[in-house]
Image (spheres, grey):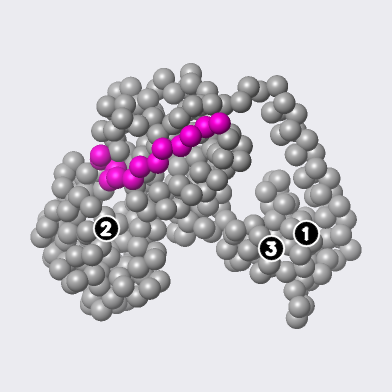
Amino acid sequence: MDSRKLRYFAVTARLGSFTRAAEELRIAQPALSRRIREIEEELGQELLVRHGRGVRLTPVGAAVLQRAEEIEHLMGLIKHEANQDRPALRGKISIGMPPAAALRIGPRLAQRMAQAHPHVTLHLRDGVSSLIHEWVIEKRIDLGLAYNATPIDGLENVPLLRERAVLVGPPDARAVTAVNEPIRLRDIAGLPLIMPSLPHNNRRVLEEAAARLGVRLVMRTEVDSVALTKAMVRQGQGYTILSHASVDDEVMQGELSRRVIDNPPVFADLFLIADRSAKSESLKQQVMQEIQALVFELCDNGAWPEAVGVPKR
């Protein structure tokens, strides 16, 4: 049991509704139900009873709510006292992110930083992972997020999450019509692919996986823009391979279809990249911690579907 789960329970109990609590907490309702069920299983007691208009507390739930609110109050006091003597962070920090990650992280990170550190200015940029690597090395940005980052001397790669890679095609593509069934990497070998050029990180990981199987991928077109790649796939010019979250909106709108790659699975691992000197710089270190905590929360509460977060170390 942790403080986050207790807070989820307390908000749900106070509002008397999973739907309203999920909206206030900005968490997917199934994930909220799952977290509260985990508390009940850990305690071996039912805390909430569902009824037609929402939920009500059991006697045990009422006692747990009182303790949960006491813990919330203590956590607030701890944070307040810890910040009393800490000098306010000031300065500007630039961060590069892949497009799909930027849409999920950027707005939330900006909001958090504005509330907790109003004297810090964020400069957010998006770009493909290999380009973000270069920006960090050349010190054009302070921090970067990149998929399938390669170890480079002088840089620290901090793992944030792992996503399944998916085969992406137009909505009516035969290769991805069986959307609930995985597709083997071997069966992708004959499809015309639209992929970024080497040494793009995702292309490198895909080529390595294919080489281990002894299969050769057909690269119809090399495109170093995710938006352009998706537009070409939408028009039926070929297929591509992206992280699951990269095509969430298009799949929901019926513009693209996707199918998880399996046997073997191909993963898109998101890393936070920084110069090793960042550990000695308070502003960079604080922002790195904020990003780690935020990404883990997004995965934990279901806001980053099909991704598993790495807890902040």
- Compared across the picture, whether 50 is left or right of 226 comes to right
- Percent x, y of residue 292: 51, 39
- Compared across the picture, whether 312 is left or right of 257 comes to right
Foreground mark, 3 or 2, reads: 2
| Residue at image coords 15%, 68% | 237
Say how many tags the image has: 3
The outermost residue toward the bottom is 52
| Residue at image coords 58%, 34% | 117
Residues at discs 3 and 2 in contact (Cβ within 8 Å) = no
Work out how far the residue at label 3 is from the one at label 2, CA to CA, in angstroms. 35 Å
Q: Magenta span covers which residues?
A: 119-131
Visible residue check, residue 22: yes
- Percent x, y of residue 145: 38, 40
- Compared across the picture, whether 84 is left or right of 102 comes to right
Circle 3 Cα neighbour tier, 10 Å, few/some/many (<14 / 14–19 / ≥20): many
Assign a secondary structure to mark 3: helix
Q: Toward which corner of the image does residue 13 lie, by quadrant?
A: bottom right
Assign a secondary structure to mark 1: loop
Work out how far the residue at label 3 is from the one at label 1, CA to CA, in angstroms. 23 Å
Figure check: 265 above or below 258 = above
- Compared across the picture, whether 312 is left or right of 95 comes to right
Visible residue check, residue 181: no
Which mark, by number, is residue 44? 1
Work out how far the residue at label 1 is from the one at label 2, CA to CA, in angstroms. 49 Å
Determine which residue is flagged by label 2: 227
Which mark, by number, is residue 21? 3
Which mark, by number, is residue 121? none
Q: Earlier in the sequence, mark 3 or mark 2?
A: 3
